[in-house]
Amino acid sequence: GAVVSQHPSRVICKSGTSVKIECRSLDFQATTMFWYRQFPKKSLMLMATSNEGSKATYEQGVEKDKFLINHASLTLSTLTVTSAHPEDSSFYICSARDGGVQETQYFGPGTRLLVL
Amino acid sequence: GDSVTQMEGPVTLSEEACLTINCTYTATGYPSLFWYVQYPGEGLQLLLKATKADDKGSNKGFEATYRKETTSFHLEKGSVQVSDSAVYFCALSWYAGSQGNLIFGKGTKLSVKP
């Protein structure tokens, strides 16, 4: 099946720094990518939907200036956590919709962020 | 708002035991329902789905039936294997496929012992 990768898989950073997480569709073109956040023992929460070449659509309560999303190509979307704080520590998961197979969404393995 | 509730884990079973993971949803209307599985170190994968009431989704020996009367979509397997050890997520969407926004349950970790 289609593969979505995320990099890095785990990152530890100091409070106040910015962290960039990459999400790549390896063998298909993704017109739409989704970013989710998962807290321990909680559901995955959709943060934003990004379409290639346009601005991301953020869910209610998600700060767009803090979680910058760029979807510059059909195979790459990035999430940048700006001025990270300990409360941003979480598990971030991306998914990508295969533009050729409309009913399939493929998930990346996730990125564990720890802000000290 | 819409939500999904699934049983708390972890669930530990012996090989060949029967599995049921309960999932109920709250929504106005009849969404599509999904079960996703996440194996260690991998991304979520679609396991099965049902798009309307009384539909049964099945894959790899797993089954789930969309019950609108009880707003449930319980996951079942008659005989689990060690390779079924993973985290299972129930989810709903207002899209028939999985291409749109998904609302997930908290996930249930299953460990199968030989």
Image (cartoon, rainbow, N blue to C red):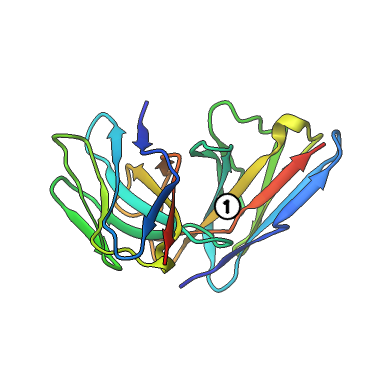
User: Which image quadrant is residue A67 in?
Assistant: top right
Name which residue type carries label 1: Cys
Front residue of A106 and B38: B38
Q: Is residue B20 left or right of residue B82?
A: left
Q: Position of residue A35 (x, y in %)?
A: 57, 46
Front residue of B113 and B110: B113
Residue behind mark 1 = A94
Q: Is residue A51 above or below residue B3?
A: below
Q: Secondary structure at mark 1?
A: strand
Total marks in image = 1
Q: Quadrant of the C terminus of chain A?
A: top right
Q: Is residue A71 above or below residue A42?
A: below
Q: Position of residue B41 (x, y in %)?
A: 59, 61
The chain ID associated with circle 1 is: A
Does any portion of residue A65 appear in the rendered image? Answer: no
Q: Are there few (<14), some (14-19), or many (20+) residues within 10 Å of tag 1?
A: many
Q: Position of residue B52 (x, y in %)?
A: 18, 47
Front residue of A67 and B8: B8
Residue located 16% across and 52% down the image? B55
Residue located 35% across and 52% down the image? B35
Q: Is residue A67 above or below residue B40?
A: above
Q: Position of residue B105 (x, y in %)?
A: 41, 40
Q: Is residue A11 left or right of residue B43?
A: right
Q: Is residue B30 left or right of residue B82?
A: left
Residue located 28% across and 65% down the image? B59
User: Which image quadrant is residue B63 in?
Assistant: bottom left
Residue located 35% across and 65% down the image? B15
